[in-house]
Amino acid sequence: MNPLKRLGRRRASVLALLALGALVTPGAATAAPDAPDGVRASTLGAQAAQSGRYFGTAVAAGRLGDGTYTGILGREFNSVTPENEMKWDATERSRGQFTFGAADQIVNGATSRGQRVRGHTLVWHSQLPDWVKGIRDANTLRGVMNNHITTVMNRYKGRIHSWDVVNEAFADGGSGQMRGSVFRDVLGTGFVEQAFRTARAADPAAKLCYNDYNIENWNDAKTQGVYRMVRDFKARGVPIDCVGLQSHFGAGGPPGSFQTTLSNFAALGVDVQITELDIAQAPPNAYANTVRSCMNVARCTGITVWGIRDSDSWRSGENPLLFDRNGNKKPAYQATLTTMGGTAAAQRPDTRSARSAAALPSSFRWNSSGSLISPKPDATHRIAGIKDPSVVYHNGKYHVFASTASSSGYNLVYLNFSDWSQANSATHHYLDRTAIGTGYRAAPQVFYYAPQRLWYLVYQTGNASYSTNPDISNPNGWSAPRNFYSSMPDIIKQNIGNGFWVDMWVICDSANCYLFSSDDNGHLYRSQTTVGQFPNGFTNTVIAAQDSKYAMFEASNVYKVQGSNQYLLLVEAIASDGRRYFRSWTSNSLAGSWSPLAASEGNPFAKSNNVAFPAGTWTRDISHGEMIRAGNDQTLTIPACKLQYLYQGKDPNAGGDYNSLPWRLGLLTQTNSTC
Ligand code: XIL
């Protein structure tokens, strides 16, 4: 396809619409009031997310076939910890022979549900095979330990938010010293430092935790011993990011000093996490006190309970968990949820889809930022507009890919920054200088393909193309373009009319990957391959949705809504005033049919009439962009609450050559989130 021809035609249609729009009075923007205070959710994970925390559970691979179990797992939790499946005796039973089947099952399941994963655990004296316990030579043991850490962490690189690098290294009782173990006895107490250094090198993105029990009471010698070690690590620059307090409590719940302990560790400059919570007999007050202590400490970033139902617990005789044997919520559940600020919704066992349908509202209101990112022309890049952004948050930074537009055509640019206030000062890396090359490349989409541990950049070149990169932050790491299709699928040739084949978009569930694209002629296409075959094998191209040309124009996004069964489709349309806006649909399957959510000019997903501009109205177009996601992988999971959308807009008075329009990027933040 000739991009100039394409662009000329697109411009012509826009100008025609603008002329048409002169007859229509554009609706005035309505001011969008802020969301009511005290936004409340009705599940543990969604409520924890309100304060930026996670609420997780230990998961046993052997229970994933139990529908009651997985029902609660998918509904309530946004983080999971494999209960036994990542331990040494499960992953390296014989020296150098690694088995990951059960751990993979848990991690892949969590990924497909949009849940994050805690890694547990790399170096521990327990559940340790005899062949390791029998090693007496320090060099051998050091090599074995480093290899174990590196191999297991590499396997799940980029998919684990926090790793318990060393578990339970300290002794109970009054010594405050490390306990005897093959690691301490053969390598000395320095084995902990060695393990953390190796772990940092293996997966620099994961938070590295020291995890232990009986360190919740501030004055206990064991707590003090761990505290001294963490303080020493921080002072000497040994990599450590968090302390996990297991919190296996008796019926009395946490000690009175629990919050003090959390704050004192946090004051060393580490996060704290409650990693294995269970309380004998699950008294509601004991749970409330534990949860409140975490909520009161800013660096307490999440809570994990050690199992779902009492019958799943390693302490099942003590009924220590939040759900009874039948999967009903116990009083401790309500106490936990309300202590985090959530509402105790009545239990309705069969309302999973009803709940998920309720996860997104049926109308949206937004506040827009001003223009946050402008083009940065240089001597060889006379750029007029920056467009079509794709964004992921990874390793403490937003990574933005976008099209650059100029009178001579399109290419791609990459920038990163840690905060939106720094977006406009970020360096622009022009990707035509990389193996991606010069020529027509536009409308990028970026995601991490976890099964291959590779970043993918999908973009249009006339075909649907992609490049890969092991390191998203390295602009020079992208491979040369490759195509998903040998040529345009027949069904597109038959329906494209005078349109153009644009805006390719990949999303996967746990079994399949789908490639969506638009034709500027009212059709959304979908092709399919398996997760194993991706990026090859896209066939079965079908029309996934259709409408009139301008009602379903281009720039589609498809997302998984976190903690629900729901997928969200956004498609850019051209309104009766000639301005761009977004319509939305939902489906419970990526290959399913799409039902309108907010899909009209009167009730749009995002349009000038439901976006307020507290910083000044700099655009009347809400055009091609991308949601801020909850994760970065191929499931394209977005939060259900407080959505944010990075979009392109432009000076309403600008006109002339379509390629030279002054597109800028701005950020929408939802103001009517009800969860
Ligand atoms: C427990 C599991 O829950 C049991 O299934 C297994 O038999 C033994 O280990 N501290 C930890 C966890 O760090 O890994 C332990 O999990 C509980 C105590």
Image (cartoon, rainbow, N blue to C red):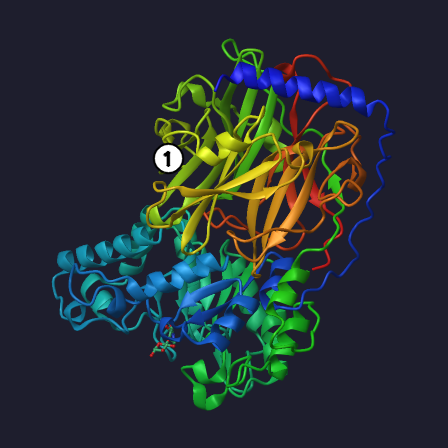
Residue in front for this viewpoint, 511 or 92: 511
Q: Residue furthest left?
A: 137
Q: Is residue 520 left or right of residue 468?
A: right
Image spot of residue 488 (x, y percent)? 44, 30
Residue at 78% over, 35% down: 608
* Up/down of 562 relative to 279, above or below: above
Q: Secondary structure at mark 1?
A: strand
Q: Quadrant of the C terminus?
A: bottom right
Amino acid type of the residue that numbered disc 1 sits on in the rendered structure: Thr
Whether residue 74 is visible to the viewer of this picture, yes or no, is yes
Instruction: Write down which quadrant ligand 1 falls in.
Output: bottom left
Disc 1: CA contacts within 10 A as few (<14), some (14-19) or many (>=20) = many
Residue at image mark 1 = 468
Whether residue 247 is visible to the viewer of this picture, yes or no, is no
Q: Residue furthest bottom?
A: 317
Q: Is residue 36 left or right of residue 282?
A: right
Image spot of residue 281 (x, y percent)? 53, 88
Q: Quadrant of residue 31?
A: top right
Image spot of residue 313 (x, y percent)? 44, 81
